[in-house]
Image: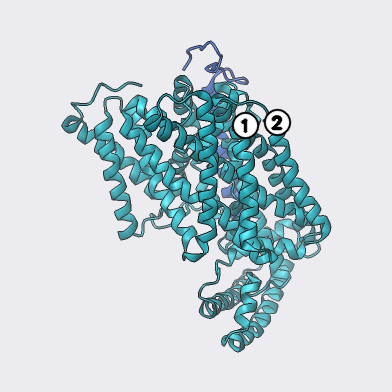
Chain colours: A cyan, B blue
Amino acid sequence: MRPLDWAILVTTIFAIVAYGAWKTRGAQDMKSYLRGGNELKWPTIGLSVMATQASAITFLSTPGQAYEDGMRFVQFYFGLPLAMIVICAVFIPIYYRLKVYTAYEYLERRFDVKVRYLGALLFLIQRGLAAGITIYAPAIILSTILGWSLSATILGIGIVVIIYTVSGGTKAVSQTQKHQMVVMMTGMVVAAVVIIVNLSDTVSLPHAVKVAGALGRMNVIDFSFDLDNRYNFWSGVTGGFFLALSYFGTDQSQVQRYLTGRSITESRLGLLFNAMFKIPMQTLILFIGVLVFVFYIFIKPPIFFNQPALEQARQTAHGPQMSALEAEYDAAFEAQKKAAERYVETLESGTEDPAAKAELVAAAGVLSGHRAEAKRLVVEALPDAETKDADYVFVSFVLQYLPTGLVGLLIAVILSAAMSSTASELNALGSTTTVDMYRRGLKPNLSDRGSVIASKVFTAMWGLVALGFASFASLLDNLIEAVNILGSIFYGTVLGLFLVAFFLKRVTGTPVFVAALVAQAVVVTLFFTSSLGFLWYNVVGCGAVMAVSLVLQPIIGRADPRPST
Amino acid sequence: MTEEEPDGLLEDRSPIFGSWKVVYIVVVANLLTMVGVLYLVTRWAS
């Protein structure tokens, strides 16, 4: 990075944080600290909800995923608009009517305190673990590729977030997210334009899309029904719907964002903004990955994108084998480039030649075989190295091929994303610990001012837990994947609790509590014994809570007090 | 929820279409349009 990049990076990050802190200065009570004083309008809510979901990994991994696997991941979001409609129609009016600070308060009003504790506890476990990973995942990639210290990167991201989240509360989080989201989208649109301009010397945009399609990267929609296929239209609409319903409707890090609305209308419009624009945003990010893929058909990409790891592997006993492989890789790249040029010529002449297309597909197969072999060699040479190469595709492209200034902007995009999602998580963890655990269980007569102080202390404590977890994350293998799966294991059960609360009016606390424990055991068993795609866990967990609670209601629910809504 | 609260938080009118049902239909139509366009792109590019 050059001085201009550093200037843009530092100015962008600190200007946003300083603005957020300045906007939220002054005395605070519980309503202003935890619900932003109910002053926010829908554009701020909409961007804040979007920024909470978009973590740094969204911008680092998603283009790399499209590079490796094509655009089919976008189908994961097809259930989101439908979930937003249900949340607007059912969830939001109830949260507003009861004037809750957290989603789990509602569970006690509807059932009893043990169900509230269960919902809050499941949230604290999954989100507490995820907060550390939200910081660690981008830090390990940026520190590797930029040569920064891993500890300094983790501390740099974490401390800034803790300071403004603790001092300004929910409103500071939302105000900073609004500007962070603008930076993120500006950065990605500019990156897309620069790549298209760079490509235009070699291939037009329509022909670039055809080349990507020939090599399986434009696999956006897949209507085939397969339960083991992680991303197709059906799993996206069904599993994605339940996941989005659970995440946006019951996860406090999102609920807290739209409870800041000036009115129920502002909250609904904020969520519907996401319903309209989330899919286009993800499509753009994935399409950038496809454009990078086409760019690297004509400009030789590294055999392994995590360059420092590749360099280390070259120094081991596997070095000579790697050198021989790289020579073969160079030849295979030239063959693929020539095949691609021939295919583009046939496209330009207006008569697409199936033989040229088949030749390109065959050449690409050889090249990807060499890349797979290189990855195997790196894993053998460096068993502890980060070998998920797709995460490094976009950031290494940015550093090598984008102009000075834009590099700083895109690193700011990644850091902004890390900070915005971490801020929401810490804010929600602090609120839930205060409202659902500390004030409910230990200090029921806590004053308004005492509650604000407790929220600040718990937010800071969760920030330190996240920092500690991020610092030790590198000691554990496959931690990121484990935490992601852990999240999807819990979401279905939590959603089940809320859907029973909303729609099964005669079910009481004890049956739904036992049903949630049973459903959780079923999902955990499925995780260990089946190959079911993880999106389906949400459907199974939610369905099990609803079905089992209905069965148990006449058996163990009679002694419960009559439910209220 | 149509109940009015003193602080106005439960004000419940769609600012553009008058009815939220119409807004929800627009959101679903937007989703179907996006799926349709992406499907056509998939077919054209493959």
- Dividing the picture into quadrants, the one containing residue A385 is bottom right
Q: Nearer the viewer, residue A168 or A331?
A: A168
Query: In this figure, which residue is indicated by the disc labeled 1?
Result: A171
Residue at 64 percent of width and 57 percent of height: A153
Q: Which mark is residue A244?
A: none
> At which x and y percent is residue B43?
58, 54
Residue at 62 percent of width and 36 percent of height: A167
The local secondary structure at tag 2 comes to helix
Task: Report the chain holding disc 2.
Answer: A
Quarter of the picture holding the C terminus of chain A: top left
Q: Which kind of residue does numbered mark 2 sit on?
A: Lys
Q: Which kind of residue does numbered mark 1 sit on?
A: Lys
Residue at 36 percent of width and 33 percent of height: A116
> At which x and y percent is residue A311?
65, 78
- Look at the image and tell me whether residue A383 can be seen: yes
Against A169, residue A337 (above or below) is below
- Look at the image and tell me whether residue A210 can be seen: no
Query: In this figure, which residue is indicated by the disc labeled 2?
Result: A23
Task: Report the chain holding disc 1.
Answer: A
Q: Nearer the viewer, residue A325 or A111?
A: A111
Residue at 32 percent of width and 34 percent of height: A115
Q: Mark 2: few, some, or many residues within 10 Å (few <14, many ≥20)?
A: some
Q: Do labels 2 and 1 touch, CB within 8 Å?
A: yes
Alpha-carbon span between mark 2 and mark 1: 9 Å
